[in-house]
Amino acid sequence: MNVAVVTVGDELLAGQTTNTNATWLCERLAERGVDVERVTTVPDRIGDIARVVNEYRAEYDAVIVTGGVGPTHDDVTMDGVAAALGRSLEEHETALAWLEEEGYSRSDLTEGTADLPAGARPLHNEVGVAPGAALEGVYVLPGVPAEMRAMFASIEPEFSGTETYREVVVADEPESALLDRIAALREQFDVSVGSYPGDSVRIALESTDETTVTEAASWLRERVETPAN
């Protein structure tokens, strides 16, 4: 299963808010064996949201959109998703009924709180108020991290793939000096390799076969200089 993550918010693009939602979602999806192939941040503009969602839903098995959910003037994500899917926004009775069960009077709710794309499945907000939505492989979640995480937990079983195993080998050598050994590793073992330089070089090995990853990591550790403890 492959997925695209779209985060919505002018504050993300301005650097005023750290995009922890994207990182958290990528980690959780990877744990479930799902390939995240795009992470995109767009402003609070209906046209931008609609364009990106429409493009990604044609390319990936699912699109997860976070942020801009609610009844305030800059909460336009539901409008953008509705436009991408060619749907109108409608007040969702099931979502309203759930909110009433939680103690919210319809008359006290801000207008638009339960407006979702027509035909969408509401995703109840266990932590906040504004519901999310799921429709045609597009999942719309709130931007508040606690609300997003709780809502994702309710749909997490819908995301699955092949489990991937990972080991990291740390080399106390220049990255350029490791190229021949990395090439030999890739020839001998069916693993994907990522090389991440810093004070030392972190070499990440991944495979769907746990034994292969373990053997590849052992092989490499025997052939690189490791940092002194």
Image (cartoon, helix red, strand yellow):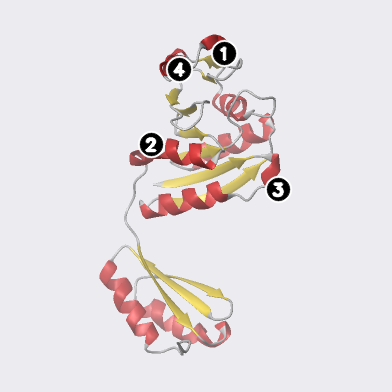
Q: Nearer the viewer, mark 4 or mark 2?
A: 4
Which residue position holds label 3? Answer: 16
Whether the residues at callouts 1 and 2 have beta carbons within 8 Å, the answer is no
Residue 82 image point, x, y percent: 57, 24
Query: Which quadrant holds residue 150?
Result: top left
Upstream in sequence: badge 4 or badge 2 = 4
Foreground: 4 or 16? 16
Q: Which mark is residue 160?
A: none
At x 50%, y 30%, the residue is 128
Label 4 vs label 2: CA separation? 24 Å
Label 3 vs label 1: CA separation? 31 Å
Label 3 vs label 4: CA separation? 34 Å
Foreground: 83 or 90? 90
Residue 101 lies left or right of residue 86; in this view the side is: left
Label 1 vs label 2: CA separation? 28 Å
At x 63%, y 51%, the residue is 18
User: What amino acid does circle 1 point to?
Assistant: Asp
Whether the residues at callouts 4 and 2 have beta carbons within 8 Å, the answer is no
Q: Which mark is residue 103?
A: 4
For the residue carrying disc 4, how many other residues have a C-alpha within 10 Å: few (<14), some (14-19), or many (20+)?
few
Whether the residues at callouts 3 and 2 have beta carbons within 8 Å, the answer is no
Upstream in sequence: badge 1 or badge 2 = 1
Which residue position holds label 1? Answer: 108
Query: Which quadrant holds residue 189?
Result: bottom left
At x 42%, y 49%, the residue is 29
User: What amino acid does circle 4 point to?
Assistant: Gly
Secondary structure type for disc 2: helix
Residue 122 image point, x, y percent: 44, 24
Query: Where, quadrant-wise, is the C terminus in this rendering?
Result: bottom left
Secondary structure type for disc 1: helix
